Amino acid sequence: MAMDQYSENIKYDEEFFVNSRDNKLFTCRWTPHKQEPKALIFICHGIAAECSVSMRGTAARLVRAGYAVYGIDHEGHGRSSGQRCYIPNFGDIVSDCANFFTSICEKPENREKKRFLYGISMGGGVALLLHRKEPTYWDGAVLLAPMCKISDDMRPHPIAVSALKMVCAVAPSWRIIPTPDIIDKVCKDPEMRKQVRSNPYIYRGKLPLKTCHELLMVSLDIEKNLHEVTLPFLVLHGGDDIVTDPSVSKLLFEEASGRDKTFKLYPGMWHALTAELPDDVERVYSDIISWLDERSDCAGSVPETF
């Protein structure tokens, strides 16, 4: 299926592939219609989210800036098959992304192009694990409110964590933990809240027990190994984020071993940085595109900035 979502300058394509577990996964791509992209950007979306609708605005901005953008709906998400939001093994998501992303990177016309990961919330955790899997493969990552640690306000009590592990062994797909509607606390722009609630591909039900356990374990693993991060990255976080912890994004900046690292903290902003009020959204995208442009054009590393 192919269609132009925006204008004659942006080419949009959709495609499905079957992963190693026989799940049919949805992928999409936005590319400049009349020019060669200066680099490739690979989107890793968050929990319960998807790419084709939610990432339209982001993709359009990045394509207009000269980039090719690729997205994949994780198993059980969006237009991909699988139980809704059921993640029995977080490593499977990482492997699916690695397989799809590298299939694009290794095409003859793309082998010389730079490759950037773009991770949002849980997708930030996916991006960091992709880097861990192949430390020198990626040229950089943009991490928006990445899942390096679940906020203390959202983290279950240690007793509940122990109980969760035991119940997961018996009934991993149970959906018994109440999931609050946090859209009003994640998206500041009322219009963006309406768009999220009207998106048929976004899941808004209870999360399976195993998914909750996987997210918690992965966030703990990432938090303990921030020093292993060596790729260039830009990490952006809202100061009033109640979903992922902005202090751990700062810790990522401080502990990562690489020299090319940038941390942007936006006081008063929430979890969904691209669903803020218009002026703030412009500032976020300006920071992202400026960072990408500097690393797409330069041959050497760029020093760390705060």
Image (tube, rainbow, N blue to C red):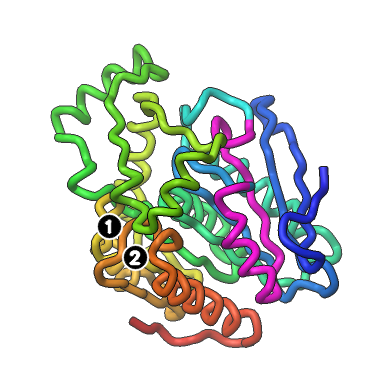
Of the 4 image quadrants, the one containing the C terminus is bottom left
Quarter occupied by residue 59: bottom right
Look at the image and tell me whether residue 210 can be seen.
no
Say which residue appears at 20% left-offset and 27% top-offset.
Answer: 162
Point out which mark residue 154 bears: none
Label 2 sits on a secondary structure element that is strand
> Which image quadrant: the N terminus?
top right
For residue 138, above or below residue 73: below
Residue shown at the point (49%, 86%) measured from the top left: 302
Q: Indicate whether residue 72 is drawn in magenta.
A: yes
* Residue on which disc 1 sits: 241
Q: Which residue is at a point 62% across and 41% down the rendered structure image?
A: 96
Instruction: Please indicate whether residue 7 sits to the left or right of residue 173 in the image.
Output: right
| Residue 196 in sight here | yes
Residue annotated with mark 2 = 237
Q: Amino acid at mark 1?
A: Asp
Q: How far across and how far down the image is residue 90, in percent?
A: 47, 37
Q: Which residues are magenta?
A: 53-80
Frontmost residue, 20 versus 23: 23
Q: Is residue 99 above or below residue 58?
A: above
Residue occupying image coordinates x 53% and y 40%: 199
Position of residue 7 measured from the top left corner of the image (x, y, whole percent) = 76, 64
